[in-house]
């Protein structure tokens, strides 16, 4: 492992693997990430909004038993380690996408693992919104939908974007782990091509790719969040 370049033949073989597989692995990682993030937010964003608006002192209180069920489901899913959750949910992948192997098969488990995180991120962001702004909207007769879409979400936009950045990084990490159970992308290169076959140049190339993707998303998210933050604009 520590003498990666001692055998020129093995080095050439690994470089050939990188040249032929790396581009597709990056593409596979990105399209799976996009689908997983979209579906995680389709479920997690409304759940996060309900956690805030539906509580006893929220703008649209919901039955206590319903709120307990939402919190219970989110807490349970967040507490199950990802690989165990993936093993449990893979039969659902067979039903939904027709297979339990490959990148597509990992999307349902990834969504189920990620949407509770999204819900908590959204909940935390919405709780940061100034209560006075919400009360002012209520006093003007705004409906619950209007308060959520025109007051709470816009006011929480910088925090929501920061949360989305964390979500991207977390799902990328999940995707790398999913390769141990048949997933694809850069995680597959790192684990199956690299670690299992002792091709450590391939492994480190894949790891570096994952690190770079996280850094890109983190930097972009930070800049976008800062550009949307009214407090920073007022200071400038």
Image (spheres, rainbow, N blue to C red):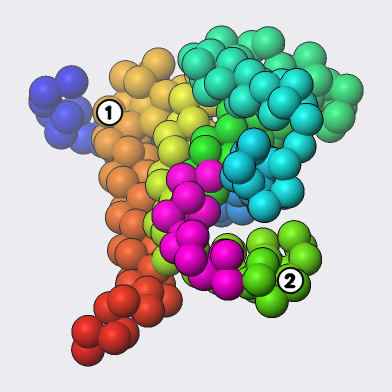
* Residue linked to disc 1: 200
Callout count: 2
Q: Give the secondary structure at mark 2.
A: loop
- Answer yes or no: is residue 85 visible: yes
Q: Whole-percent x and y of residue 72?
A: 63, 19
Q: Whole-percent x and y of residue 176?
A: 46, 32
Q: Which mark is residue 18?
A: none
Q: Is residue 40 above or below residue 198?
A: below
For the residue pair 73 and 129, the one nearer the viewer reads as 129
- Answer yes or no: is residue 35 visible: no
> Taken as a whole, is the magenta stretch helix, strand or loop?
helix
Please tell me in which quadrant of the rendered image residue 112 appears. top right
Residue at (15%, 33%) from the top-left corner? 5
The residue lying furthest to the front in this view is 139
Mark whose residue sits in front, 1 or 2: 2
Name the quarter where the C terminus is drawn. bottom left
* Residue linked to disc 2: 142
Give the residues in magenta.
123-136
Q: Is residue 122 above or below residue 88?
A: below
Binning the other alpha carbons within 10 Å of mark 2 as few (below 14), some (14 to 19) or many (20 upward) gives: some
Please tell me in which quadrant of the rendered image residue 140 appears. bottom right
User: Which mark sits nearer the N-terminus, 1 or 2?
Assistant: 2
Binning the other alpha carbons within 10 Å of mark 1 as few (below 14), some (14 to 19) or many (20 upward) gives: many
Within the magenta stretch, is there residue 6? no
Q: Is residue 74 left or right of residue 205?
A: right
For the residue pair 98 and 163, the one nearer the viewer reads as 163
For the residue pair 75 and 150, the one nearer the viewer reads as 150
Q: Give the secondary structure at mark 1.
A: helix
Q: Whole-percent x and y of residue 128?
A: 42, 55
Residue at (42%, 24%) from the top-left corner? 191
Please tell me in which quadrant of the rendered image residue 75 appears. top right
């Amino acid at each position: 492992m520590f003498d990666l370049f001692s055998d020129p033949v093995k080095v050439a073989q690994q470089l050939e693997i990188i040249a032929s597989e790396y581009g597709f692995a990056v593409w596979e990682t990105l399209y799976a990430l996009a689908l997983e993030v979209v579906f995680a937010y389709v479920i997690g964003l409304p759940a996060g909004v309900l956690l805030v608006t539906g509580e006893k002192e929220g703008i649209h209180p919901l039955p206590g038993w319903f709120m307990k069920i939402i919190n219970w489901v989110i807490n349970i899913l967040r507490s199950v380690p990802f690989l165990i959750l993936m093993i449990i949910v893979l039969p659902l992948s067979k039903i939904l996408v027709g297979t339990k192997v490959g990148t597509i098969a990992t999307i349902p488990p990834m969504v189920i693992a990620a949407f509770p995180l999204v819900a908590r991120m959204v909940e935390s962001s919405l709780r940061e919104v100034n209560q006075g702004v919400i009360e002012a909207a209520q006093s003007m007769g705004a409906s619950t939908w209007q308060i959520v879409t025109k007051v709470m979400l816009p006011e929480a936009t910088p925090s929501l974007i920061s949360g989305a950045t964390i979500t991207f990084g977390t799902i990328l990490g999940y995707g790398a782990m999913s390769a141990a159970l048949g997933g694809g992308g850069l995680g597959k290169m790192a684990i199956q091509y690299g670690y299992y076959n002792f091709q450590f140049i391939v492994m480190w190339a894949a790891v570096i790719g994952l690190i770079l993707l996280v850094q890109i998303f983190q930097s972009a998210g930070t800049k976008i969040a800062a550009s949307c933050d009214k407090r920073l604009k007022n200071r400038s």
